[in-house]
């Protein structure tokens, strides 16, 4: 702890002056403000100059910086302690952070442990010493010896005929299909609904084992972008990190193939698939990219489905989703989700 007695306060989005100071401090430390933040604090000196900051998003810590004039005073330690208090008050006990490789040791001294690292780019850390290993050990209990096992990772926002086709193909070509449903709630369709629709839409396939992805597989929507130079570098870091995590999962479960849908329209998935095709085979995992299912000459995507729901175009929806998904969206249970989709300005993601 430092001998300095500085105050830490919550910064509200409406406080324009404080937010300008935070942007300036982050910029001076080579960090851009992340697009996903739900709590930000600032530390001030006696003259009310902002000298340190940090933020949270969900169960992660982000955008932490100390002014160069005050480094070495133990301020980052105080910022992290403050953010952890905020997290514990929210009921989040399992906390994650992403940091540059040269800062990993510092956070290690504050009680964070490395999950995976991409050299020269990023380290993913958590506050549980054996958190990731415990997760792998739980998954390893579900491996089946002597069987050809494949994996599919799906967000399914919501579950479409395209997802169903991909699952059917992977299930038909392997003894066991491990289907990981992204459990992070960053999508317009909430996780419990996505999971229900995936399971109902694949109930006819008897060799599927379903898994919640847990906190280690995260979506590109919430991957932190604050210390990477551009969008492409962010996508690349996310892909490499995600694939490093996935490789560890595959090794624990004897998974030797991963299926993915081809993505002609999405920059993110395009770059991601390219990296996957290179990285997975290096680790003994076959990467199978499946051409997308089409309807009336257009590929079926969750974006198209969300657009049809937003527009109230039930006729189009019938051509894009299995009956199980359609039945759900026609039911009273779906009203809140439909309202959420309709309230969103842009439901087609890049």
Image (tube, helix red, strand yellow):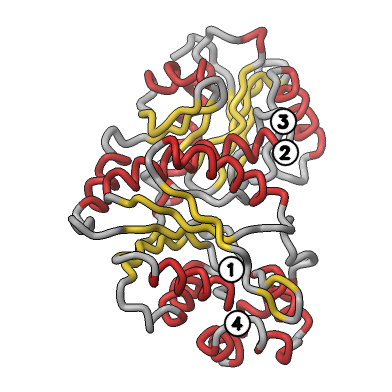
Quadrant of the snapshot with the C terminus: bottom right
* Residue 84, quarter of the rendered image: top left
Measured Cα–Cα span from mark 4 to mark 3:
39 Å
Q: Which residue is mark 2?
A: 231
Numbered label attached to residue 157: 1
Whether residues under marks 1 and 4 lie with C-beta atoms below 8 angstroms apart, the answer is no
Whether residues under marks 2 and 3 lie with C-beta atoms below 8 angstroms apart, the answer is no
Q: Which residue is mark 4?
A: 321
Query: Left or right: 211 with respect to 309?
Result: left
Q: Position of residue 321 (x, y in %)?
A: 60, 82
At x 51%, y 87%, the residue is 324
Classify 10 Å Cα crowding around label 1: few (below 14), some (14-19), many (20 and above).
Answer: many
Q: Secondary structure at mark 3?
A: loop
Earlier sequence position, callout 2 versus callout 4 = 2
At x 54%, y 89%, the residue is 323
Measured Cα–Cα span from mark 1 to mark 4:
11 Å
- For marks 1 and 3, give the one nearer the viewer: 1
At x 44%, y 60%, the residue is 152
């Amino acid at each position: 702890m430092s001998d300095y007695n500085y105050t830490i306060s919550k910064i509200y989005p409406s406080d324009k002056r404080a937010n300008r100071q935070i942007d300036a401090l982050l910029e001076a430390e080579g960090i851009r403000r992340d697009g996903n933040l739900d709590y930000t604090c600032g530390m001030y000196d006696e003259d009310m100059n902002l000298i340190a900051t940090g933020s949270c998003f969900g169960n992660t810590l982000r955008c932490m910086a100390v002014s160069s004039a005050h480094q070495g005073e133990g301020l980052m330690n105080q910022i992290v302690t403050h953010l952890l208090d905020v997290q514990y008050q929210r009921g989040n006990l399992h906390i994650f952070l992403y940091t540059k490789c040269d800062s990993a040791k510092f956070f290690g001294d504050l009680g964070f442990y490395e999950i995976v690292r991409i050299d020269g780019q990023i380290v993913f850390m958590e506050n549980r010493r054996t958190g990731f290993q415990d997760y792998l050990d739980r998954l390893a209990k579900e491996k089946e010896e002597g069987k050809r096992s494949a994996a599919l990772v799906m967000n399914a926002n919501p579950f479409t005929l395209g997802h169903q086709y991909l699952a059917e193909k992977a299930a038909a070509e392997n003894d066991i299909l491990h289907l990981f449903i992204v459990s992070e709630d960053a999508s317009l369709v909430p996780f419990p609904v996505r999971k229900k629709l995936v399971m109902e839409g694949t109930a006819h396939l008897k060799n599927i084992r379903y898994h919640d992805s847990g906190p280690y597989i995260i979506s590109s929507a919430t991957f932190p972008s604050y210390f990477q130079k551009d969008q492409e570098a962010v996508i690349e870091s996310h892909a490499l990190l995600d694939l490093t995590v996935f490789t560890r999962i595959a090794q624990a479960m004897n998974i030797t193939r991963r299926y993915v849908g081809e993505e002609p329209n999405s920059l993110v998935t395009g770059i991601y698939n390219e990296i996957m095709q290179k990285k997975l085979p290096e680790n003994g995992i076959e990467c199978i990219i499946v051409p997308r299912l089409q309807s009336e000459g257009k590929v079926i995507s969750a974006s198209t489905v969300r657009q049809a729901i937003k527009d109230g175009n039930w006729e189009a929806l019938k051509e894009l989703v299995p009956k199980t998904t359609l039945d759900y969206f026609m039911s009273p249970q779906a009203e809140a989700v439909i309202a959420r989709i309709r309230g969103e300005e842009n439901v087609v993601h890049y």
